[in-house]
Image (cartoon, rainbow, N blue to C red):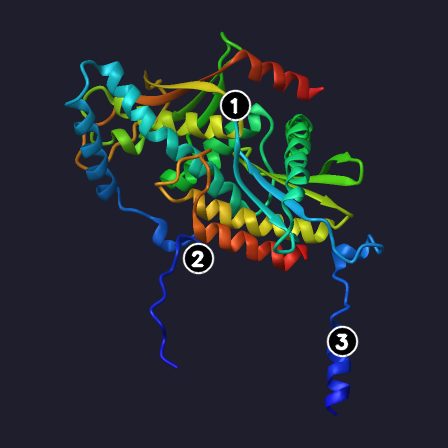
């Protein structure tokens, strides 16, 4: 029986997560970059799917991600006024990467850089972050449009990311 | 297993509408009168007092907008001038003061001016003179909501004589008010331009 148990363990470790099933060639999904952008600057950033202990050379990829996100801001702004929904879906595509956006009532934008279509999971992730952001902004000591430094917020956003995006 | 005393953070609180959200008028009036008196002793004229009160209300506007938009569960933003003004005069007013604003009008003389009327704003119920100065707090709240939603505007409070047919509201024990408060909202030209572009 012990042999069959280990065999079972071995098979479950090869299970692919839904998001990475799109790129069957790589067993590791590319990291997702999540930004909360205010009027002038990013207020919060997080990465999902990045395996711990990545080499320093991967930093150039991260910086490029930020540049890609920044270039999409004009398009986000435009769709904010054309589309009255908060969830703006995919606003820009660069090579194989897509940027999905969610814009709150105060035009605080949640942007996610990702590969592969996954509208439902991303929408659920944005809804969770939206609830957390609204609760955070109710804090009278949190000034609007300032960087988010709350550790609790960070922990919960990371948890939501793990739940929906990996 | 005993219940551990866990620290509940604000991220755990329920922010949907609750009964405990209501605050008594007397509690608000006491705190507000302290705020007004605090500023009164530190400014040199009435317009500075109005500025201080308006800036106190400004931050509240952003938070009110976020909260009410979240509570409505529609996940939509207002993109037109009329819709954001209707949001302010009905939904925001109801949430803040318990009833919708008395009317919303567009100025005939100036295309960029709109007016929100309230016969008896909470900030000036117990104020004997310069009611419009006390109402500057509410102008600040309106300005905050508009700025948050992406509509830059200047909002000012004024007192206007009651017309013939209008009923005179009065609180118990207080003299009948002779005028109503009007919040004048003046949008910047870019906002009007954007609104007309969106209309097409």
Q: Both on one chain, marks 2 and 1?
A: yes
Q: Closer to the camera, A80 or B29?
A: A80
Tell me the subunit letter for badge 3: A
Q: Closer to the camera, B126 or B164?
A: B126
> Can you give x and y, in whole percent of width and height, for residue A140 in the image?
35, 41
Q: Quadrant of residue B45?
A: top left
Q: How far is mark 2 from mark 1, CA to CA?
A: 32 Å
Q: Both on one chain, marks 3 and 2?
A: no
**Do the residues under discs 2 and 1 have CB atoms within 8 angstroms?**
no
Q: Quadrant of the C terminus of chain B?
A: top right
Q: Is residue A91 left or right of residue A146?
A: right
> Can you give x and y, in whole percent of width and height, for residue A22 in the image?
82, 53
User: Does B93 appear above or below B47?
Assistant: below
Name which residue lies at 74% across and 50% down.
A118
Q: Quadrant of residue B179?
A: top left
Q: How far is mark 1 from mark 3, CA to CA?
A: 58 Å
Q: Secondary structure at mark 3?
A: helix
Q: Quadrant of the N terminus of chain B?
A: bottom left
Q: Is residue B65 left or right of residue B49?
A: right
Inspect this view and state whether residue B16 appears: no
- For the residues carrying marks 3 and 2, which lies nearer the camera in this image? 3
Residue pointed to by mark 1: B151
Q: Secondary structure at mark 2?
A: helix
């Amino acid at each position: 029986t012990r042999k069959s148990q280990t065999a079972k363990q071995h098979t479950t470790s090869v299970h692919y997560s839904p998001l990475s099933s799109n790129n069957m060639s790589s067993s590791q999904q590319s990291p997702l970059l999540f930004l909360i952008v205010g009027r002038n600057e990013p207020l919060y950033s997080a990465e999902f799917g990045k395996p711990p202990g990545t080499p320093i050379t991967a930093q150039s990829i991260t910086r490029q991600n930020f540049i890609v996100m920044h270039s999409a801001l004009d398009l986000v702004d435009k769709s904010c006024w054309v589309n009255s929904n908060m969830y703006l879906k995919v606003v820009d595509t660069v090579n194989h990467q897509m940027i999905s956006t969610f814009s709150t009532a105060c035009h605080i934008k949640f942007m996610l850089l990702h590969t592969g279509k996954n509208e439902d999971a991303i929408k659920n992730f944005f809804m969770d972050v939206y609830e957390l952001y609204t609760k955070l902004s109710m804090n009278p000591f949190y000034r609007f449009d300032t960087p988010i430094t709350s550790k609790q917020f960070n922990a919960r956003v990371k948890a939501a990311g793990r739940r929906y995006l990996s | 297993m005993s219940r551990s005393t866990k620290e509940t953070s604000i991220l755990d609180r329920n922010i949907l509408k609750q009964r405990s959200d209501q605050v008594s008028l007397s509690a608000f009036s006491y705190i507000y009168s302290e705020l007004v008196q605090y500023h009164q002793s530190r400014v040199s004229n009435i317009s500075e007092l109005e500025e201080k009160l308006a800036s106190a209300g400004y931050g509240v506007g952003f938070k009110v907008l976020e909260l009410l938009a979240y509570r409505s569960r529609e996940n939509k933003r207002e993109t037109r001038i009329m819709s954001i003004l209707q949001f302010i005069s009905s939904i925001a007013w109801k949430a803040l003061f318990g009833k919708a604003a008395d009317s919303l009008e567009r100025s005939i003389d100036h295309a960029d001016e709109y007016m929100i009327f309230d016969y008896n704003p909470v900030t000036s119920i117990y104020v004997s003179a310069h009611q419009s100065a006390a109402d500057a707090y509410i102008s600040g709240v309106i300005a905050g909501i508009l700025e948050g939603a992406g509509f830059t505007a200047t909002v000012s409070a004024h007192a206007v004589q009651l017309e013939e047919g209008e009923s005179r509201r009065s609180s118990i024990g207080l003299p009948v008010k002779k005028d109503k408060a009007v919040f004048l909202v003046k949008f910047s030209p870019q906002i009007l331009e954007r609104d007309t572009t969106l209309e097409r």
